[in-house]
Image (cartoon, helix red, strand yellow):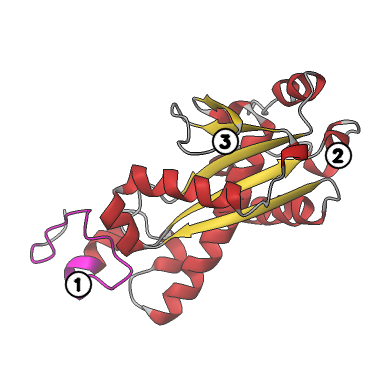
Amino acid sequence: MVKLPSKSLERNLIAAGHACIIGVDEVGMGCLAGPVVVCAVLLRPKFFQHRRRRLEYLRDSKTLQAHQRERYANELTAERYARHAIAVIHPKEVDRLNVYGAARVGMRRAIRRLGLKKADRPFILIDGPGRIKDVPWEQLPVVKGDRKVFAIAAASVLAKVHRDSMMVNYAKRYPGYGLEAHKGYATRLHQRRLVELGPTPLHRRSFRLTYDQKST
């Protein structure tokens, strides 16, 4: 049985006086092609006052099927006491910053796009071991947070749905690579097509593949 993320941390932070909770997560870190996408989800105290049955089994996006992620993303988008912002770091910027730096830049951008004010008194929960620099709000990094913390899991779902939609559209522009299926990850099919067709502008040059040799 899959363990569901808890809302306990968020409720404790609200009880301590924070006016909103922000969960942050990124997708696309390990891809050969496509952007890194970051989502910041803001949840108000009233979100946690009632049981949200339609979001009850929301969890880390990697453990969900595509149709489940899309359903949860629609529920979160329609939720009165939640809102979110997306930041997209495109391949050239990923190459320039390195993938970890790109994720951190994306996190700052997504948080800023929420348009926070001092009265919001947010607390930011981040997936992973590191804090986000140059963000003037209290924050806590949580290792494997997308498995443990609801707000981070919600961000993982919204980021994944957004990026998957982008990759399906990119597949129309760059046919033959199977982007609509593997979404830019280093599957055998993707590596084989890279050898056969060569890289596109969508491919990250910081991930070195030997394009002139057969993929194993």
Q: Is residue 199 left or right of residue 22?
A: left
Q: For residue 3: magenta? A: no
Residue 136 bears which disc, if any? 3
Residue 161 bears which disc, if any? none
Determine the residue positioned at 22% across, 67% down: 194
Q: For residue 198: magenta? A: yes
- Residue beneath label 2, please? 53
Query: Secondary structure beneath disc 1?
Result: loop
In the picture, which quadrant includes the N terminus? top right
Depth check, front residue: 198 or 116: 116
List the single residue furthest toward the front. 118
Determine the residue positioned at 17% across, 67% down: 195
- Location of residue 10 by image quarter: top right
Determine the residue positioned at 51% across, 46% down: 108
Q: Which residues are magenta?
A: 194-213
* Residue type for callout 3: Pro
- Location of residue 90 by image quarter: bottom left
Residue 198 bears which disc, if any? 1
State which tag comes first along the sequence, 3 or 1: 3
Q: Is residue 65 visible?
A: no
Q: Residues within 10 Å of mark 2 (few under 14, many from 20)?
A: few
| Above or below, 176 relative to 125 | below
Q: CA distance from mark 1 to mark 2?
A: 47 Å
Q: Are marks 2 and 3 in contact (CB under 8 Å)?
A: no
On the image, the x and y values in percent for residue 109 come to 52, 52
* Residue type for callout 1: Gly
Q: Is residue 35 left or right of residue 68?
A: left
State which tag comes first along the sequence, 1 or 2: 2
Q: Is residue 17 visible?
A: yes
On the image, the x and y values in percent for residue 42 come to 71, 43
Q: CA distance from mark 3 to mark 1?
A: 43 Å
Q: Residues within 10 Å of mark 1 (few under 14, many from 20)?
A: some
